[in-house]
Image: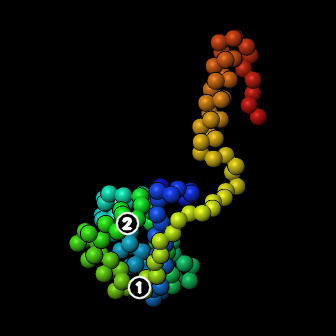
Amino acid sequence: MTIIKIDKDIITLINVFTVDPSKQQQLIDTLVETTKHVWRLQDGYVSASIHKSQDMRKVVNYVQYKGKEAFDKRLDNPEAIIRMNKVLSMAKADGHLYDVVFTDKKNNLQPSSRVDLKITVRALLLYQFRTARKPCRLQ
């Protein structure tokens, strides 16, 4: 699962493919198959997400790796080169490496805060059980 957060150990490739609308689904299928059978099996791979534009002219591939070294090694696999040549025969690629510098979400609880909250709620319930008090309702 893709998790977008500021993490100096994760590098992100955002690749925007320009494709003929009649080939968009074929490009998506090829990217999905390449991800499942090549990228995800390589050391340093973290996650991938593929997006398609509603006008059918673009496909965006968002891929995360554990650092630049893992990213650079991905093309050491001959199968990866064959599959990427197939992708490039269907679409023009414009890819760049990125570092996450900011994220925001509506839910203010960060994952670690949710864990802390669960521990706090469990501790409260255990305390109530041990002291034989009537359980309170969480609102």
Say if residue 27 shows up in the picture. Answer: yes
Label 2 is placed on what type of residue? Phe
Residue at the spot of label 1: 91
Front in this rendered view, residue 70 or 2: 70
**Identity of the residue drawn at 30% across and 71% down:** 75
Which sits in the foreground, 25 or 15?
15
User: Residue 12's x, y, as percent?
Assistant: 48, 66
Q: Is residue 121 left or right of residue 35?
A: right
| Residue 33 visible | no
- The secondary element bearing badge 2 is classed as helix
Question: Where is residue 72 shown, x and y percent of the image?
Answer: 35, 68
Q: CA distance from mark 2 to mark 1?
A: 21 Å
Q: Secondary structure at mark 1?
A: strand
Among numbered discs 2 and 1, the one appearing first in the sequence: 2
The residue drawn where x is 41% and y is 58% is: 66
- Residue 30 picture quarter: bottom left
Q: Which mark is residue 71?
A: 2
Q: Quadrant of residue 83?
A: bottom left
Residue at left offset 41%, top offset 85%: 91
